[in-house]
Each structure stands twice: as structure tokens, then as C-alpha cells.
Amino acid sequence: MKTLLTTFYMTFAVLLGSTGVGFTENLWSLLKSNNHLVLIRHALAPGHSDPDYFDVKDCNTQRNLNDQGRYQSKKIGDLFRSNGISKAVVYSSQWCRCIDTARLLDLGEVSELPSLNSFFKHFDREQSQTKQTMGWIRNAPLDTPTVLVSHQVNITALAGYSPASGEIVFLRRLSDGSISVIGSIQTLN
């Protein structure tokens, strides 16, 4: 039921956001306040999943950003700066496409957060990784704009919403430590 309600409210928020600039301006203002953060799905990395010989420490074995994805990442960073956010606390999955997206945002030092790693080929990890990420969110200061760069499956498990490549999903941390999606901005042209 919670996922259904989250999906309903997210759809409603996205529809509202598509009708006016004021809504997106409010999202950026909220991100500058306490108890808010964003999840970003890595920028465009053509293909589906990773090869069987995938090695998290070797980008040559992974699906990576293409030129459009690198450009998209830089433009996402520009979007933050145009909305008054030039520095942020940035965490990323250890996958190269996420780390590259996070670095190209150019919002600050990028730290790895393994619970943001994709579990696409290992759905048995979904529950434990989601619980770890929620624990991190519950305990994070969130007094500075905070950005988590991850994968579609992780964001869907956390927020009940399936983002497009490079989509920014705005969240509010509630008093009980849970999260609520308050809007999103797609960044693909």
C-alpha cells in the first residue's frame, strides 16, 4: 500500500512540476534546507546490465557513460549551480558510470557508498542494501545539499519510483526517518 501511495503522490508531484517553474524552484529551495536530499540515476550509459565478466574495479568490463551521458552529467551539475547549489555532499555507487556521473557534476568530492551499488543481477541483495542505504539516510546530517548517485533498481527500491537516466529525484526525510518523494526533474533532452 505504501508503494502505491508513493507512486500516486509521485505521479501527482511530477504532473504539478510539469506545469510550472515555481514547483521546480521550490524543489531546489527545499534541497538547500535540512532533511532533504536527491537521488540521481547515473547519466546515459547505453545497453542493458553489465557483461558477465564485470569487475567493479575495471571500467573496461562495465557499461559506461557515452558522450551524451558525459555531457548530460555536466549539464546536471550546471543545473545545480544555476539554482544556487555549487557545493554538495556527494555519494556514489562504486560502478564507473555512477562515479563518472558524480564527478562530472563537479559539486565536490565524491565518496563511494557500496549500498548504492546495483543489485540488478543479484536481487537477493535488494533488501539488505536498501536497508543499509535507509540507515545511512536516517543518520546523515542532511544540513547541506546531499546527492546520492545510483542505479534504477536501487532508486526504485528506496523511493518506489523508476527514474530515467540522469533523472533527479527529490526526497524529504520525515521525522520517523523514512523518506518521501517530493518531485523529480528529468534531464535527458
Image: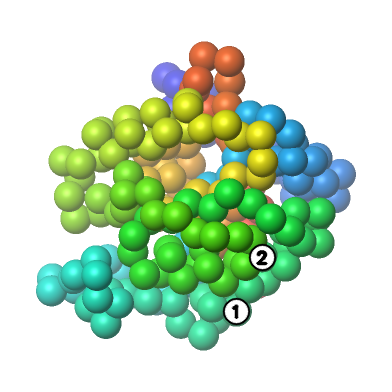
Where residue 115 sits: x, y (%)?
A: 32, 44
Q: Residue at image x 67%, y 41%?
A: 144
Q: Looking at this rendering, what residue extends furthest in the left direction?
A: 53
Pointers 2 and 1 in contact (CB under 8 A)?
Answer: no
Q: Looking at the image, is mark 2 or mark 1 earlier in the sequence?
A: 1
> Mark 1 is on which residue type?
Tyr
Q: Looking at this rendering, what residue extends furthest in the front direction?
A: 109
Q: Nearer the viewer, residue 7 or 53?
A: 53
Dot 2 alpha-carbon crowd within 10 angstroms: few under 14, some 14 to 19, many 20 or more: many
| Left or right of residue 146: residue 44 | left
Where residue 143 sits: x, y (%)?
A: 66, 34
> Mark 2 is on which residue type?
Gly
Residue located beneath label 2 in the image: 77
The label shown at residue 71 is 1
Dot 1 alpha-carbon crowd within 10 angstroms: few under 14, some 14 to 19, many 20 or more: some
Relative to 107, residue 117 above or below: above
**Which quadrant holds the N terminus?**
top left
Q: Residue at image x 13%, y 74%?
A: 53
Q: Residue at image x 41%, y 43%?
A: 156
Q: Looking at this rendering, what residue extends furthest in the top direction?
A: 176
**Which quadrant holds the C terminus?**
bottom right
| Left or right of residue 64: residue 17 | right
Whether residue 183 is visible: no
Where residue 137 sits: x, y (%)?
A: 48, 32
Q: Nearer the viewer, residue 184 or 147?
A: 147
- Quadrant assignment, res 171: top right
Q: CA distance from mark 2 to mark 1?
A: 10 Å
- Nearer to us: label 2 or label 1: 2
Whether residue 148 is visible: yes
| Dot 2: element | helix
